[in-house]
Each structure stands twice: as structure tokens, then as C-alpha cells.
Amino acid sequence: MSDQNTIDGAFETLSEIQREAASWGDGAFMLLAGPGSGKTRVLTSRVARLFANEAAAKWRILALTFTTRAADEMRRRIEQLAPDAVERLYVGTFHAFACEILRQSGSHVGVQTDFKIYSNPGDRELLLSEALRVAKLDLGEPLSKAFPVLDGLRERLAGPDNCLRFFADPDRGTRFAAAYQAYVDHLDHENALDFPAILYMAHKLFTDFPLIAERYRRTYRYISLDEFQDTNLAQYAFLRALTGNLYKNLFVVADDDQVIYQWNGASPQRLQQFAKDYEPALLQMPTNYRCPGEVVEMANRLVTNNRLRTANKQPLLSGKAMPTAPDRVRILVFDEDSHEADGIAADIEARHGNAPSNIVIIARTKAILQATKGELGKRGIHAQLAQRRDSFASVPYQWLHTSLQVANRRSDEREFKNFVEVGNAMWGFDLDTSQLAARAKSTTGDLLRTWAKAAADLPLTPLGARIIPLLRSDLAEVLDYQKYLRAANATLSAAVPTLLEEYPSVDEDARAWKELYKEITGAVGRAAPLEAFLQELELRSKEPPLEAGVIPLLTIHASKGDEFDHVYLLGLAEDVIPSFQSKKQGDNSPQLEEERRNCFVAITRCMETLTLSRAKSYKGWTKAPSRFLAEMGI
């Protein structure tokens, strides 16, 4: 049997059509790959083969995808196949690559290397509030409602000076343009970017300084893009600015039946735009090796009701040989939504026991998932609702994070204030931010050294006596953040059992930090500067990884890219999926077609069994069965 960790071995495991795609060399190429068709194996095999064909060359390969998890998995697979080529590979998300560009060349557009990224909604709202106060402006609307507007402008690559055309009300447009300018000025003053500004500034860099884009084109001979159907306007414009009109070595993997991010600007029309701009060769890879044949047939029946699809799109083919079974696909019907939550928990207990493995519960809304989690808990079955966490939940790991932030920006009083306050809570200090800042200004100007010196003169807890000297020696005096992180995190991890009573989330943060450290050092390397580590950390969720025996509870969007033996899809009722809002747009609307694609994505996560459920009423309102059930042939 061939070794699948070698390039030749990996190619031997590919089907004929997979091998044809993985053998593609120069020129633009679009691979329409259905769910479970082995696209990641194709992508990684192709990249490894390109490196092997010219092992002594200097050019690099850029591979972009949409989640850090997908990027980490792709990098790991390529490194297995081509370990000697790791230095010639960049794998990451659009935003991570844009950060890399801005670290190297952002000073041309006013972005300094150690820029701070703000992704937390609360932090962004505070920044906007400060910006409006300084500029003496009144937006006239709640600040929480301002960001969908400001983010929408960024994603359309509209700046404060050219955004009025997007407002039907000129007065509102004028107010937002002024607020937008004040917000941008405030971020510039802080040398900071919010999440939407990362791509905006990278695009600006390439368009204002085309020679820089040309340099990247010469560096990256090949570009691969996974999940291309999720690309929004800003991401596609960034890609166009990077490649220009002549660069054609793009290998794009997409599936217009899995566009489920229209709210973020994704559109099936992006594939048509790519075909027009790059004139790619086209290959379809429709064989599904993941799902039972019954599910493949259901998926085909469902998605053919959509009109916004690539012309001549081939139906999914079943490539998984398994006997039919009467309970392979089930539909469970309950009287009320509370009965649905209880019934699903009872079904899982009866079929899979109290320690189920490789099961997932998927729903359109988090409310349904929360109710089901409660019923599972009553039966002693552990479940975790997957949701992005922008910050650490426990004080110990908040302190560890803020200590790195202050080490990176030693004169930043905003960062220092957070660090001092968290440190006071962690160590029982009563240090005053203003006094320490004044003391720092009268000496070296280094806020972290000033704090470390002050802390050394205070009574320390046993844990503080082990960790604070590490901060002083390895972070404040000599910046060896990797050494500090390893030692401080090991000390905190060992103390988790004693910290749990005071900080109930510290065990989750310890698991999250361990996973994040491994992922980030894999992405940027152990020799990466501290600013690169922190920027990568800001782009990633601080959600802890699942423990063994814990059932993930996922929204449909969160389930994309995953696969499980047993899938439970809940809430298949009108006004739930499809949602009430999509139904209001009409039966043939893009919104309702996206809901159908949501259902398509959800059912194609399964490898063994699929259980569908619905209730006859939700929140006391009678609901008809989802139209998607009939469309699937149920």
C-alpha cells in the first residue's frame, strides 16, 4: 500500500478527475467541487506537486481560504507532503495575508508594523464614541447601529470622502461621512485597524502603489483559493489588485450551491465575474465520497429548485459504497419546540448513550440549540454551543494577553490601563495607572518596566511569585516573549485546579490558549515578532476546543467545512428554515435560495445517518413543515 504522506502516494489515492485537477499547472482554473468531493486533498496534492517539480526554485505559493481552522489544516497536510518546501508557502485567510502585507509595507499608507487590531464589538464602539467626542460630532443614531453602515462602506471600498453616493438621505450621509472620517482619524492616531479596515488598507496599498503589488506577483508564482464562492466584494477587489490584468496563475475551488454568506457580500455572481476576468479552464468534480446515497439524492432534489446556479451544473454523484438502511435518514415530528428539544436529547441517549462520539446537532438559530443543550444536560450529556469568542473569559488569561499587548506597545496608555486593572484584580494590587504612567514618563518611558518594578515591591501570592519574575526577566527587561509565554502558560495551566473556584472559565481559557499557541506558531513561526503573534491572535476566536464526548451544537454557518458520522438537523419548519425574513422576499428571491443552500449545506455534513426534526409550533405559533422537506422527497 502506498504512503499517503508522500506526493506519489497522495496522487495514487486520487480518482481520475481529482488527479486531473491536481495536475493543473499554469493558467487560470476553476474547479466546481461539490460537498465531500475531496477538494482539500486535490488542493494540497497540487501544491505539493508544484513544489516537487521545481524543488530548487525561489518562487512561493499563496493559498487563501476563509477560516483559520481550514488554513491550519491545509498547511498541516501540505507540510506532510512537502516538508522541505514549508518556507516557500503561505497559507492563511484573506485577512491574515492582508495583515502580513501591511506588516511589511503598510507604512506607505500610514500603517506602522506594530498596528493593533480591534475586532471586539465593545472595543470598537468605545473607539467610535471617543472619536465622536474628540471631533464634537453627534451621529444622531445609537452607536451599536452605526457599525453595520460603516462596515458596509468599508466592504464596498468606500472611504469617508466618497461614501455619500450610498445614502438615499443626504443629511444622514453627511453625518455618517463625518463620523466615518473621525473614526478613521482616531484609529490612525492609535496606529490601529478594525477588522474591516484590514482588507481596505491592503487594497489601498496595492492600488496606490502598484509596484508593491507587482512585487508580490513576482514572489507568488501560484495562487490557490478555497471556498471561492464565499468571496465578498472587498476580498475580490483585493485579489484583482494583487493579480492585475496579466497574472493568470489562479487555481480556484468553488461551489455555487454552498453560497451561504450573502449577508456578508458573497454571491453566486462572483463565479461569473471570475470567469469573465480570468477566463479559466473549468472542471466539475461532482462525486460525493462523504454522504450516504440517500442523502446525495435528497441534496440533488433540493438544490435543483434554485435558479442561481452555474449553467450545466452536474448533479452530485454518490461515491460512497454502503448498503441502504431503513433508518439511515429519519424525520422526527413533535408538537412543540420544547418537545423537540427534549425528544432529540432522548433520541441521542437511546441511540448513542451518555458519551456519544462524532455526533453534531445543527440548527438555523442559536435559540433552538440552547434549548436542546439544556435538555441534553438534564440527561448528563455534555454539549457545547460553538460561537466566536473575541476575548478570554477569565482574569488569569486576560492578564497574560494584556501583558503581551503592553510588551508590544510600551508607551500605549490605553493598553497599559487595561493591563493594570486586570493585574490589580489578578494579584490583589492597588496600583494607579496615572501614577505609574507619570513615573514612566519621568524615567525610561517604558510602562511595562515601570509596572514590573512597582510589582516587585508588593506582597505577592505564591502564583504571582512564580509568574511576575518571569514577566520582568523575559518580557520587560529582555523581550523573549516565546520563553515568557511557555513558562507563564505552563505555570497557569498547572494552577488551573486551584483557580477554578474563583475563575470558573479558566480551564476553558487554558485549553483555548494551548490550541491557539500551537496554531499561531504553526502559521507565523516561532521566530515571528511579537506584533505578528498578537495580530494573528486577534484574528482568531478564543473559544476552547471541544473535549472528548462533548456534542457540538452548531449553526448551519458554523458547520460549514465539517463532517460528522451522525447529523441531527433541527427546526425544519416554515419561518425557521426557511426563515420568516427570507419568505417575505418571495419564493424565487435570492434570500430564499440562500436558505435552500443552507439546508443543502447542513444535510451534506453527514457520513452515516441523518436525523431531521420539526415541531408543529414554535414559541406558541403553529408552523407548517418546511417546504424543503417536500423538495427533498420527504
Image (cartoon, rainbow, N blue to C red):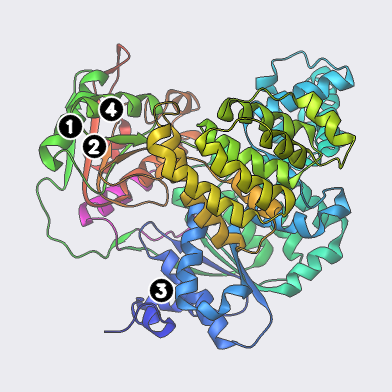
Mark 4 or mark 2: whose residue is earlier in sequence:
4
Residue 292 covered by magenta stretch: yes
Residue 501 in sight in this render: yes
Give the Cα separation between the discs numbered 1 and 2. Answer: 6 Å
Identity of the amino acid at label 3? Gln
Instruction: Residue 49 in the image: state x and y as whole percent.
Output: 51, 81
| Disc 4 versus disc 3: nearer the observer | 4
Q: Which residues are magenta?
A: 289-315
Mark 1 or mark 4: whose residue is earlier in sequence:
1
Verify CB contact (< 8 Å) between mark 4 and mark 3.
Answer: no
Mark 2 or mark 3: whose residue is earlier in sequence:
3
Instruction: Residue 90 in the image: state x and y as whole percent.
Output: 61, 66
Please give the label number shown on residue 18.
Answer: 3
Q: Which residue is mark 1?
A: 332
Q: Which residue is mark 2?
A: 612
Pick the quarter of the image with the C terminus.
top left
Determine the residue positioned at 85% across, 17% down: 137
